[in-house]
Amino acid sequence: MKKRMSLLLAIMLLAITVLAACGGGGTAEQPPSQGDQTEQTPPAEGEDTTEPPAENGNDSQGYFKAEDPSANPANALARKDTLVVGMTAPKGVFNPFYWQTAYDRYVVDAIFDSFFSLNGDGTYNNRLAESVEVSEDKLKYTFKLKPGVKYSNGEPVTVKDYAFAMKVYHDSSYDGQSDLLSVNIKGGKEYNEGKADEISGIKVIDDNTIEIEVTEANAMTKDNLGTVFFVPESVYGKGYKQGNLEYMKDLHAKPVGSGQYVLKSFSPGQEVVLEANPDYFLGAPKIKNVIYKTTTDETKLAMFQSGEIDMDMVTVNEDNVEALKEMGFLDINIFPTNGYGYVAMNHKDPKFQDPKVRQALIYGLNRAEVVEIIYGKYANVINIPQSSVSWAYTEEGIEPHEFDIEKAKQLLDEAGWAPGADGIREKDGKKFEVHFSATADNPVIDALIPVMTQNYQELGIKLTAETLDFNAIMDKKDKGDFEMFFAAWGLTPDPDSTVYITNGPQNDIGYSNPDYDAAMKKGLNAFDLEERKAAYAEAYQVLNKDVPDLPIYQRRDAWAINSRLTGVDITPYKNFAIDLYKAEIQQ
Amino acid sequence: MKQYIIRRLLQIIPTLIGISIIIFAISSLVPGDYITAVDNPTMTAEKAAQLREIYGLDKPPVERYLTWVGNMLKGNLGDSLVHKQPVTTVMNNYVWNSFFIAIFSLILSWVIAAFAGVFSAKFQYSLFDKIITLLVFLCMSLPSFFIGLLLIKFFALDLGWFPVGGMKTSGMNGSTWDQLIDIAWHMFLPVTVLTMLSTGSLTRYFRTSMLEVIRQDYIRTARAKGLKERTVIFKHALRNAMLPAITLMGFELPSLFGGAIIMEKIFIWPGVGQVYLESINMRDYPFMLGFTVFISVLTLLGNLLSDVLYGTADPRIRLK
């Protein structure tokens, strides 16, 4: 009896495990943030509040200054030389090779530097690099390092450290997320396969000059090469043997870099304490102590109010923004999220192969209503898979596909889908029924499904939704075993993407169009920005006409920042940690 | 007795093997793996295949199970994929934080429940009994996140007596003593909520078993002897009423280390519950499996412990 009892308990535990697994909803919007996938935005309803429009006349985004800085809580004012940034708990992988979540990245960005640093608009400028020369054929890159830079342990920064970092990225046992093999450095593949013990394309000319040769170049090669973090080889290379990076995990919690801050302490799940690097080569950071404190969505606002945190990222909806504005002492920086939500269709399914059907599906869906229900004014309907603030964004030649049920019906008629006896359209004896795989507990789904069901019913399409765990949908997606699902993509600063390219690794929907492939290839291989812009505009026009999936919305992200802080630079591309040394606390 | 314990310990082994097979089977039946859960939009197919190979996710389940069990026998639970650290290190980082609030709320709720249960049994159907019953049912039925947020609103925001969340004040550099006080101050609200939740059922339990005992003949005999009422209740009745509770005590063992997911999220307590939940969502199998096995072992040991304690406390069922 007792034995059965304990087994029963174990099984119950497991059942809970599986049940819990089914509860995890989410999308993959921020590319580096693996621990934080849920879109927790509750549907924001209610009337518009009276908010002063930001400078560009659009009151759903912009920088809103605090209205009443004197309301600042005493707790916050008492911290004269300490900044407390709230965020989801970093995992403690403070290693430039291995970080995975956006929050670990914030720590890495504060502690390490690379040749380039990110600008607010997604382009790069020199940080550790003094100059970069690119050969005529774009295959040779010569980086010159600024002289006299030191690591926090006192050792000088040299390009040998860069060469070492490249070896780590090319090592066969490297299991981080960065993929420098795809940059095609000469000899990189041989090193990875263990056929060579040096990467032949990397030549250290002197302590401050390094030349890198690639076999194949594209528009991103220079940036990819320039964003490799510098780590002291004496620390990170101690004990390195080709094919064995096991020792690295002992270094995750003990980062040594040349950057703005040094790690003072880390309490898992609680806080990361950083201290200014007084010898930072761009000048000592103005704020001496920075603490990354763990917060959760439930209590963020309360912690602002009690003065326990100075800045944090907040979910944008009307309730939250209103509550933050009411506090009075917070600046709010609202900007478009670097990603978009879409409804995927399986192109292997015959009914979705006709572009007319896909066009009918987008004309026949009231996307504006869906977006309004979920995010109120803090999101907009999108028509191309690109952020409105990207340099590649275009509206030229883009059809907005506004809700037009008559047009949708007409398109379906043209495609040969005629209404059957029960009102459901049929073609060749097959009814138009769509099976939608929906994520559980997702506010987007809660708003999308009812609208979609109703709209499509009017079109004569029967929509049935099945609720599944996020990972289960991703699994179906990989196997191609789906008809429709909703998900979100994160965008990178560069518009190059493999989501719609024929047989692209992220092309799960099976879409293929040679015109699009050609335009994307042109964009990736052009080195002039205007040329690239034109190529991507062409690519987006093809997508817009083809409707490979139904683009739904781009929402907003926001950071609330205590008004006693100045110089905090945050954009959709650039996180606060990159130029943290410029931030200041007003006394 | 010793022989009995050894026999029971040996019986744990086949049970554990069964458990490990079941949890591994379930984990490999669940769709998706760590790579799909990360869903990195820029990851190439080659990179994904390479990572799966390094993590061993490309191998057949039976082979993976044998590797996992083999390593576990050597005391190696593997590396957490999310934390990039050995599973034991990650557990050690978070389990103790969960343990602290759990042990305090355990002690508090048992003490409160014992007293409340005894008195409401003693004065059955009195006003006191009714109020206690109302209170415990209220605490039991309110959802924990609701009480948690309510307490934060009153005690942290309006009154400012306690912090909103976390385990210590950021940027505080005091002596060890100051830091302990700081932690205790941060612990107050989460412990209060956990205690409120668990006291309810325990109180009812004590009340029922006390009611049963109090009607026994030997209690009447004790009273007839002219013993003081306090002695009758606390010495003669309570002792016997406590017996079934000992079984409960053993079952508390895994919950001491298991973490409280909702509570940890609301009070931003750095406990293991959230980490476990995340490992499930992220398909971080090494951690998920490792921690499940850990909790199963504790459950089995707790089971054994309660049997042994029961035997020690109650001569009637003492083993020969």
Image (cartoon, coloured by chain):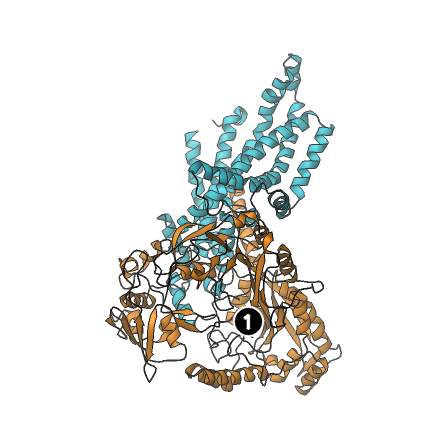
Q: Is residue B29 left or right of residue A458?
A: left
Is residue B16 placed above or below A223 in the rendered structure?
above
Residue type for callout 1: Asp
Between A564 and A114, the one nearer to me in the picture = A564
The residue that appears at 66% across and 66% down in the rendered structure is A376
Between A316 and B197, the one nearer to me in the picture = A316
User: What's the colour of chain B in the image?
Assistant: cyan
Q: Position of residue B57 (x, y in %)?
A: 42, 62
Q: Quadrant of the N terminus of chain B?
A: top left
The residue that appears at 59% across and 53% down in the rendered structure is A70
Q: Is residue A332 left or right of residue A410?
A: left
Between A287 and A316, the one nearer to me in the picture = A287
User: What's the colour of chain A in the image?
Assistant: orange
Is residue B293 placed above or below A47 in the rendered structure?
above
Q: Determine if residue A575 is in view.
A: yes
Q: Determine if residue B18 is in view.
A: no
Q: Position of residue B39 (x, y in %)?
A: 49, 66
Report crowding for label 1: few under 14, some 14 to 19, many 20 or more residues within 10 A (C-alpha).
few
**Tally of marks:** 1
* The quadrant where residue B200 appears: top right
Q: Position of residue A267 (x, y in %)?
A: 44, 48
Spot the residue most to the top.
Answer: B226
Q: Position of residue A190 (x, y in %)?
A: 28, 73
Q: Which residue is mark 1?
A: A481
Q: The disc numbered 1 marks a residue on which chain?
A: A
Is residue B256 placed above or below A442 in the rendered structure?
above
Q: Is residue A468 left or right of residue B302?
A: right
Q: Secondary structure at mark 1?
A: loop
* The quadrant where residue A243 appears: bottom left
Is residue A223 placed above or below B253 in the rendered structure?
below
